[in-house]
Amino acid sequence: MLVSESRLLSSSAPPSMAHCSEDRIPPPHVGVDQSMKPVLFEIFGEMWTVQSRIGQGVSASVYRVSSGRAATAAVKEFQADTQAGDYGYHKERSVLEHIQGHKNIVTLYGVFTNHSCLGISTHCLLLELLDVSVSELLVRRSSAVQPGRLQEGHSMWLIQHCARDILEALAFLHGEGYVHADLKPRNILWSADDECFKLIDFGLSFKQGNQDVKYIQTDGYRAPEAELQNSLAQAGVEADSGCTAAVDLWSLGVILLEMFSGKKLKDTVRSQEWKDSSAAVVDQIFTSKSLLCPAIPVYHLRDLIKSMLRHDPKLRGAAGTALLSPFFSIPFAPHIEDLVLLPSPVLRLLNLIDDSHLHNEEEYEDIMEDMKEECQKYGSVVSLLIPKENPGKGQVFVEYANSSDSKEAQRLLTGRTFDGKFVVATFYPLSAYKRGYFYQTVQ
């Protein structure tokens, strides 16, 4: 496969890049014809191998690719010779090129044209490869709830982390004059290497005041004014767009409510009760969960969500204003489930070492050597630490060169036995590890 056009937005190839998902793309295991995926892409003079198809939509497919230098990335390939494919490519490329540089927005490394052996040319984006989406986090959290227990949402720590990251992305995006217009759980992804959530998929984005997309937002996350506009467009009625950056705040409000409640709210936001008073429904959801977390001031989160779900878009405020909410001034600790769900380059191993081993210097050094030797089987170990005192006493912290190695180690070490004990392996924030800060995680 040859490249006739290429444009690299960065002077160097991406290091351990991180996932991009395409709007309207199902999870990789849902109805994707793996037999039709390309085998190679030639990108900027280098051959990249297609490892898997990670999404497929109406106008584009997304692939995980790797180069001979062990770098990984995502290629978003738009359908050839179709109006939707060409429009989608030029639209997303244009928006991404204008908004690069923010830590909470997916990075575009470059664009290229791919020529297959069948003589078909396709436009492609080379993107940062990210990790788990909020949609996947919701599914995993829901499936982890034990039978007979109340439906539980995500921890305050995780909700706060996601809310802050995406509000910062929106504040930047809106400051540049753009509206995302399709904010939903599948379009918010975790970066294992940067330890933050990032916003992806700008296929429906538009410049505020110059909306060139008739139908915006996804059902379940669609603001009332977008619902009205879409209905008028479907009926063939020409009307001035009343959609502003406030539509993104509405979508985020629903997403945060889903993360708190632990369930999808598509039917709820379609109900007449919601249309009559979304604030009353939000109050009901928070009241029903108040017994689960009585000591946590969840009313700050409730008020933040309610401010985003005001029916009048002029009353929703701006993303920058939302970041001033008291909710973001509260220090939360992660739950152990959070550290299982969110990959990072650091692995934390529990249930391994007795206190008696920590105070015998010879045994301690032997254990350090044994653990390093074992952990190096799964990837390049940068450092290894076993604190002798609390916090973190007796826990093993292993820093790998990248999150790919730590994910493989977590997968292979979990459930293994070491000195007769079953290993429990979670991830751990790299930033906290570097500072020598060890969370006393909430169980």
Image: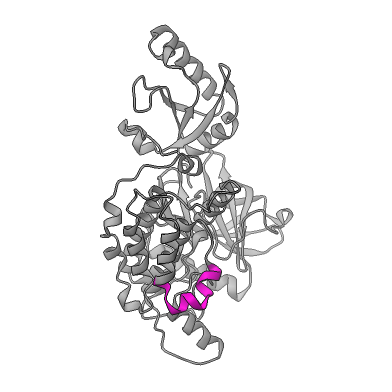
Residue name at image x 45 percent, y 38 percent: 443
Residue 174 in view, yes or no: yes
| Residue closer to the observer: 29 or 291 | 291
Q: How many marks?
A: 0
In the picture as drawn, the residue positioned furthest to the bottom comes out as 237
Residue name at image x 50 percent, y 68 percent: 203
x, y percentage for residue 115? 63, 60
- The image quadrant of residue 102 is bottom left
Q: How is the protein colored in the picture?
A: one colour
The N terminus: image quadrant: bottom right
| Residue closer to the observer: 220 or 248 | 220
Residue 256 in view, yes or no: no
Residue name at image x 37 percent, y 22 percent: 387
Q: Is residue 90 above or below residue 75?
A: below
- The image quadrant of residue 315 is bottom left
Residue 17 covered by magenta stretch: no
| Residue closer to the observer: 39 or 264 | 264
Q: Is residue 353 above or below residue 378?
A: above
| Residue closer to the observer: 258 or 431 | 258
x, y percentage for residue 129? 51, 50
Prevailing secondary structure class for the magenta stretch in the rendered image: helix
372 left or right of 390 in image: right
Residue name at image x 50 percent, y 81 percent: 214
x, y percentage for residue 216? 49, 75
Q: Which residues are magenta?
A: 266-279
In the picture as drawn, the residue positioned furthest to the right comes out as 35
x, y percentage for residue 224? 44, 79
Q: Is residue 182 above or below residue 30?
A: below
